[in-house]
């Protein structure tokens, strides 16, 4: 039996695979009703622990357009979960014989990763809290690719709530991975968070530089933009003269609604940009398509709906062919020439001590009876690790070796040489001692 | 590309089309399971903004019996709408690639008309507040046609809550359109409203006369009936001798439940008719079938369920073949010989001023961010207009011309000559002046 | 037309039929995706008056794997029922043309029996309150049959809440019917109720004897077990030496969660067994499979999930092929060689007096406008009768004859000779007199 493939994160697909998925989606999109021969007899179960009608209908449409069947559980929170069943148990039951694939929406971050570990059929992450929603990101990328013909080197302006929008963060990582340039035009107080900027730089080589966005006029009234560009010599050289990077030609504007439900007390959205005909009249925006993950409230004026650059409804529609391609791929009905990513998916088990993940919304905290804990090493120097489920960085003060039973400071040379499967993280010395470790050399 | 056909109102179908739809439904009803070849690969989305399990299941059964697929959103109110998305946006997304047809249930009157304007696929109105529910009306007519062989000249008694029942009003309009005679036997205080009677007379030529319903005995204990008959000379002559029309032979009795949720404080339902074996024993009712849109409470006694004249469960069952015919027609899989109605569907845009529709449940008031307003001219003399969405009459005091910028009294000769697309309605002079209009000749 | 078959109770299938159903299920389970040719064009409606996502998905998966369609009403309580419609009316409408089979979940006991009376298509009971859930029981039996090759003579230990668990009671009856031996190891205070033990003895010949469960060690710490064995001479002789029966080899352990929602104030679950590796280490349990109807909370430790004897997830998965076989059978797409049970399904109508059923959750009490009452005679001497819907025993003080209009004491010779269809039950003399009956011979 071949390994079951899941789609928990966009990174579960290699770049050549994604481009091939786009070609398939394009083919599907040309006549949505011609592919019912691909998955007859296959059943996808929509397990939605929070409502998201749009996402659910998009998946269910895609599955039916492939000739497959659908099981719908749109209100998991009020049924199985209410009876105290763990996600792991539910997934084992549903993947046992009910369904050939699971589409999971869950409010806990890392839930889809956990589900994938317990499932005997492919799991697609249809949103796990603020963490990931890979088919949304693929749909966004696909729209850009379809309209512009390529992704590398494009100039994409991100506008609005760059702080709390999961969609924006995932999209930015994906843009950087494909070598697109990003201009951040946040609403006041809703700037891109540091940890996102750091990951963009460390993992994708996207270097932030101060940008001059005055050419965007009303779309960027405060001109306080950040320009992120893939760190390739010939491109970086453009901005190394000390002056701010100038935004001269924009391929796409990506708007988001203010994520008011996540805003803190102090956050203001009074200054939130409203995109309309006036805002889109600046010269560099002449050929810029306007994208939005929807639903919108009033951050894009109705008047702009008839503008040929308004792409948000087409973008939503393209979720269907993209999801058809993903479903067909994971169900083994579509074969790609490209090779999957060579990611080491194994998490390092956290063997002793309390759950070190600092994220209260992490599935390792929210799921009752969950006993699996694991981390990924992000770097050895400095020693940094992330929760294997929700991707939050784990704060490490001291590290120990399960073999020597000694503990060391995080930045010591010894610490960096401990084998991953022998690593233990401690918040402080008291915890280390309580767990029976002693100071190195003591 | 041919124009997309919607079913927002029964009037969207011509009389010959309706009769042809009945023939198709009859054919479908003879073997519901033989038509799965008609719509394979097509998907209908049920967007229900208020629950109506019976209606939803009937549509979804019909679609599946045609071999098509179904997307179900039975709880739209708690999902997309809760995120503040407008109906127009939802419809544009769902009609983009998700579904090939939309079945819409919405509490706002006129919602289906609005949805049809924004949809790129056919929209079927499955109930928009108290406004219309055309497939219910077609199902009622179809039952009558199937049982009696024709519609013209039938005698149909409407019993119960004739005041608040949308079903009764729509059915009465349809009966009048097909030339059936209507006898109104309302519960006390729940008489047919004046605006319904006026529309029956003005649009369908159904003249009300006082009727003697004493022959119906217990079914019409107060004998305070109204007889509406198509105003054709040979029929009207029957009742021009000054005496009340006598009810001598009834083809069908249509019962409704009291719409208690809409009753005012003063409304009493103590005197509400309860139909049972005794009430149905009067001589003119010997061949009368008994219909009811269901659900019933106790206005029809269980004891009558075994009577061969009780047709209400068959009537409900016939909703499936009727909806199969409608779905097949709108999806282009059934072609009719009859021609569609030559209705001018264009609404006149209301260009300036506030929304003049007086109906607070009209979708033009209830939908956030809705900007389209429009009306239909009902008559030029007197000048009368109805909201283009919910069909409520718009109160007009003064009218203006957007060309001359003058205003006039509604009944003036000048007002009647203003071109529809230049017409402006004002509630009073103050509003007209505030909007920059001046008195005619001033 | 042949009689419509329903599955309201496991007893609606004969023992040879059940074994043949198991053979079919085994065949289906070998390749779930090869049977889509069996029910194309057929539609099953899930009418769920209380949520049960697992059961619903299992049925809907089975129906789709047979190539059929599904109508889902997962929230009947908030829709049709909220409009005051009776279950009988809903069933008549849905069975009219919407669906070819109804899967019903309802909180009232006896609801499925009532539904079957009014339905024109097969009804499957997917749980009616605390009464029955026959496909769950069949799934449990099937798992045992598949793992052990037969049912007769197996030793099955029932552990946990034996008092309130419907699943346990139904499973015990079915085990007894198939000649398996049952060992009851209840949590403290949650012993098998007397009426269940009586029915096991009277209807299925399962004799309870005191058992020595000390060999089960930690699984039965209090060793206060009851052994129920089919009353066949050669088996009973094993335990007639006055000593307690010894549990020496166990084929299956069936765990249940504490039904805390039904527990009384005094019930304690502190002593509730938690099954883990330690509990399963006793010698007689070496080959025992562990079953659980799921969802579990923590009565089975996660650590045991990897043990090859843990069968609960496979048991859940096997609900799909079992339901495929049941659906195919009731839809007439599978024919069995075995003959159906020769049960007299006719209830004796209760013609006068108040509803004598003492169960407040019985559908004859909870369904508005329900007028059918009926009973089954359980025995003539002593005269005992059960509600024809919920199976609760009807308390009888006096009995009358509708022919003689006399009443008699329940235990009199006259009472035992009254024909069932002339029997009247009275709670006391006052009721009898009030209904116009006189004392015998008075």
Image (cartoon, coloured by chain):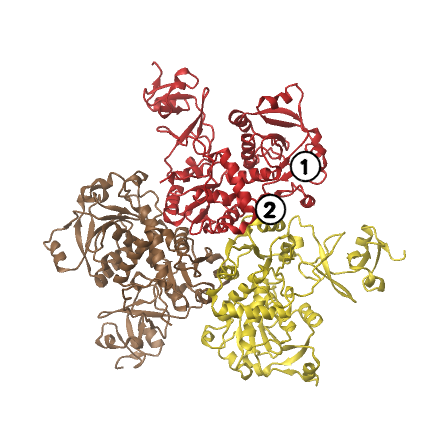
Chain colours: A brown, B red, C yellow
Image mark count = 2
Q: Disc 1 is attached to a residue of which chain?
A: B
Q: Is residue C353 above or below residue C383?
A: above
Local crowd size for mark 1, using a 10 Å CA cut-off: few (<14), some (14–19), many (≥20): some
Q: Would you say the residues marked 1 and 2 are in contact, meaning their CB atoms lie under 8 Å apart? A: no
Image location of residue A52, percent across then percent down: 41, 52
Identify the secondary structure beneath mark 2: loop
Q: Position of residue B436 (x, y in %)?
A: 32, 22
Q: Is residue A39 above or below residue A297?
A: below
- Label of residue C201 in the image: none
Q: CA distance from mark 1 to mark 2?
A: 30 Å
Mark 2, other Cα within 10 Å: few <14 / some 14–19 / many ≥20 = some
Q: Is residue A191 visible?
A: no
Compared with residue B413, is residue A112 higher up or lower down, i.e. above or below? Answer: below
Q: Where, quadrant-wise, is the N terminus of chain C in this rendering?
A: bottom right
Q: Nearer the viewer, residue B144 or A327?
A: B144
Closest to the observer, A22 or B237: B237
Classify mark 1: helix, strand or loop: loop
Q: Residue furthest front?
A: B337
Classify residue A119 as left or right of residue C49. Answer: left
The label number, if any, that marks residue C84 in the structure image? 2
The answer to which quarter of the image holds residue A234 is bottom left
Chain of the residue on which disc 2 is drawn: C
| Residue found 13% across the figure and 60% down from its top | A233
Q: Is C431 left or right of C238, judged from the image as shown?
A: right
Q: Which residue is mark 1?
A: B287
């Amino acid at each position: 039996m071949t390994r079951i493939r899941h789609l928990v994160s966009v990174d579960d697909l290699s770049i050549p695979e994604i481009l091939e998925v786009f070609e398939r989606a394009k083919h599907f999109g040309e006549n949505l009703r011609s592919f019912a021969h691909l998955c007859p007899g296959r059943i996808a179960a929509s397990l939605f622990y929070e409502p998201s009608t749009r996402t659910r209908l998009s998946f269910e449409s895609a599955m039916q357009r492939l000739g497959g069947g659908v099981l719908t559980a749109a209100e998991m929170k009020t049924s199985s979960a209410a009876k105290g069943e763990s996600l792991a148990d539910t997934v084992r039951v549903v993947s046992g014989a009910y369904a050939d694939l699971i589409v999971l929406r869950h409010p806990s971050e890392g839930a889809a990763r956990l589900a994938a570990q317990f499932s005997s059929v492919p799991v697609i992450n249809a949103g796990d809290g603020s963490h990931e929603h890979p088919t949304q990101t693929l749909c966004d990328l696909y729209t850009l690719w379809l309209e512009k013909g390529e992704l590398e080197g494009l100039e994409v302006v991100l506008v609005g709530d760059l702080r709390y929008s999961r969609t924006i963060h995932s999209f930015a990582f994906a843009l950087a991975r494909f070598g697109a340039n990003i201009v951040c035009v946040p609403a006041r107080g809703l700037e891109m968070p540091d940890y996102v900027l750091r990951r963009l730089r460390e993992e994708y080589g996207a270097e932030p530089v101060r940008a001059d966005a005055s050419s965007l006029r009303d779309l960027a009234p405060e001109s306080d933009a950040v320009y992120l560009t893939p760190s390739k010599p010939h491109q970086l050289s453009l901005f190394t003269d000390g002056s701010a990077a100038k935004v001269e030609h924009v391929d796409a504007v990506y708007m988001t609604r203010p994520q008011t439900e996540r805003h803190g007390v102090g956050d203001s959205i009074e200054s939130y940009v409203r995109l309309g005909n006036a805002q889109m009249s600046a010269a560099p925006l002449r050929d810029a398509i306007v994208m939005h993950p929807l639903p919108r409230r009033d951050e894009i004026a109705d008047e702009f709906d008839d503008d040929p650059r308004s792409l948000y409804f087409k973008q939503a529609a393209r979720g269907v062919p993209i999801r058809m391609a993903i479903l067909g791929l994971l169900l083994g009905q579509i074969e790609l020439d490209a090779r999957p990513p060579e990611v080491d998916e194994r998490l390092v088990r956290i063997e002793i001590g309390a759950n070190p993940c600092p994220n209260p919304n992490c599935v390792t905290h929210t799921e009752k009876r969950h006993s699996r804990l694991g981390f990924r090493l992000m770097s050895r120097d400095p020693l940094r690790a992330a929760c294997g489920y929700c991707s939050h960085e784990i704060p490490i003060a001291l590290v120990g070796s399960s073999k020597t039973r000694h503990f060391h400071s995080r930045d010591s040379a010894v610490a960096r040489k401990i084998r991953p499967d022998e690593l233990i993280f401690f918040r402080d010395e008291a915890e280390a001692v309580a767990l029976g470790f002693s100071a190195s050399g003591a």
